[in-house]
Each structure stands twice: as structure tokens, then as C-alpha cells.
Image (spheres, helix red, strand yellow):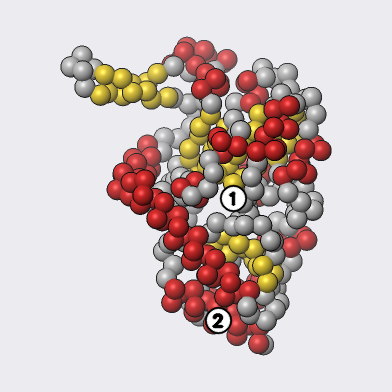
Amino acid sequence: MAYAVFRGKRTRVVISPAVHPHYRATLRTYVQGMGLDLAGDDPEADLSAGPEALEALLDDNTALVIVQYPDFFGRIYDYTALAEAVHAKGALLAVAANPTALALLKPPGEMGADIVVGDGQPLGIPLSYGGPYLGFFTTRKQYVHKMAGRLVGETVDSRGQRAYVLTLTAREQHIKRERATSNICTNQGLMALAAAVYLSMLGKNGLQRVAELCYHKAHYAAQRIAELPGYELAFEQPFFHEFTVRCPKPVAEINEHLLEHGILGGYDLSQDYPSLANHTLLAVTEMNTKEEIDYLVEVLAEVSHD
């Protein structure tokens, strides 16, 4: 969409190394055939640096800057200053956000984000070996005509009742042909319906309660784990429900021990970040009980004592 906004006149895309490795890999695939320059995609960069480090990568050819909220390591940053720097260069800021976290955190739009995207799986969609899931894509009203895909608008029918219709269809392939910003893709309407049912069932207060449970349970787990010999939190930044732990042994070895006790361990960050050997990414959600967390800590303690 950013490419369409600038009509191909800007060709530089800046992405934080703290964006999910799979997102970055997908972006590398996209830019290959579009003549775009991808900057910041360096897994060996200083991962302790905040979003201000991205400002040094901005230039007058920058079309888009991409960050994650919370980032891949679970950290929460305020991107307001970055948004101001991005806009000063005339570029757009895109934020990949966790929808559950947004029930507690400051919305990216209030920080100055122009585009907010994310994975809708946390919205009541079961884990199913990678799918089917749904994604969400939002932008400011001034950029709606550059969005891909079909848009549904609310109106009233001939009886004055609420109705939904396809709107702004002049953007689409059957009218704009090769100049359209939309593309051929799969339809995840069933998953969107399931997410809508989940959100309707919870309501605003219910979703906030889910987010609070995620936050408090994750912080309880992090505190307990950090008290174990050989384990410590890798970063000082605030986090939501994911956090990075420095371990006393290789993560693969620890995960093997956990699996023997019926626990699926965290993500081995050394797979994507060479500087994070012996670092694991753990996630705790509203689904995890205190007893499960305590059992995890108990089994991790066995590894630290070996």
C-alpha cells in the first residue's frame, strides 16, 4: 500500500530487526520483484537498541517503516517519537500489533501510526498447525483508496434497516484492472466470523480482562523464573505476555527436558539471532493456570541444578 501511495517514486522500506522473523522473511520475498530496497533487516544488529536506532536509516527515499508492538521479544515501546521522525521524512509508519495487547496498551494510531496490521489468531481462533487464521489491516481514512482487497461498508436498506454492502469498489480489479492495488488471495471469512463472535461474546470489558490475565500471569512467571539460578530476563523493557529469558544451558537441551515432563518449551531465539544463544522466548496467556506456571518453574529449576 505504501508503494501505491507514493506511486513507486519511493523505494526504500525500513524494518526493525525486532519484527517477527517470519514477517521479515515474507517481506524479503515481496521486495525482490518490486525493485524495493529493504533496510534494517539485520539479525546481527544491536537488539538492545530501541526504535530510535531506526531513525538513522531514514532518508528522502523512504516510503515505509515497519515495527512490531509488542515486538518479537515481547518488549513494549512508545513509537510516538519514531512516528514524528518518519513523518518528517514524508514516509509512513506501519505497526504489526497484537490485538489482545491493544485492550490494555496505547493504540498505535495515537502514536502516529499510518497503518496497523496483525494476526487475528488470538481472537478466539484455535491453534491449528498454522491455519486457517485471519489477519487484520487498518489505515487512516486518507489512504483507504490505496488499500488492497474488498471493503464492506454499513448502510441502510429500502426498509431503513442496517445493511452491509461492498464499497469503494472502483479500487478493485474488475474496474481498475492491472492498476488495482488488490490481489488474488484466499477468503478467510469463516475465521473473521469466528473472531467477531468471540469479540461479541467477551465485549469490551471481557477483552480487557483477558489482556489483564495475560499480563499478570506472564509477569508472575517471569518473576519466578528470574529467581532461579542461571536464569535472568534478557531485556529491561516492559512486556505484555511474552518475554525473553537468558538460560544457563542451550535452549534445545532445556526444551528436551521440559518435553520429558509434558511441557512444550519456549522458542529458541538462536535460530534467528546468532547473538541470542541460550535465549528462549516464553509466552504466557489467560489459558495458563498458576499451577502450570509453578510446575514449569519447578522443572526449569531441575535444569539449573544439573
The image shows residue 289, relative to residue 214, as above or below, that is below
Q: Residue at x 27, y 23 (%)?
A: 163
Q: Earlier in the sequence, mark 1 or mark 2?
A: 1
- Judge left or right: residue 158 versus residue 62: left
Identity, as a three-letter code, of the amino acid under mark 2: Val
> Residue 176: x, y in percent?
52, 12
* The C terminus - image quarter: bottom right
The image shows residue 184, relative to residue 195, as above or below, that is above
Judging by the rendered image, the residue that carries numbered circle 2 is 299
Q: Which mark is residue 70?
A: 1
The image shows residue 34, relative to residue 290, as above or below, that is above
Q: Element at badge 2? A: helix
Residue 246 can be seen in this image: yes
Identity, as a three-letter code, of the amino acid under mark 1: Pro
* The N terminus - image quarter: top right
220 and 151: which is toward the camera = 220
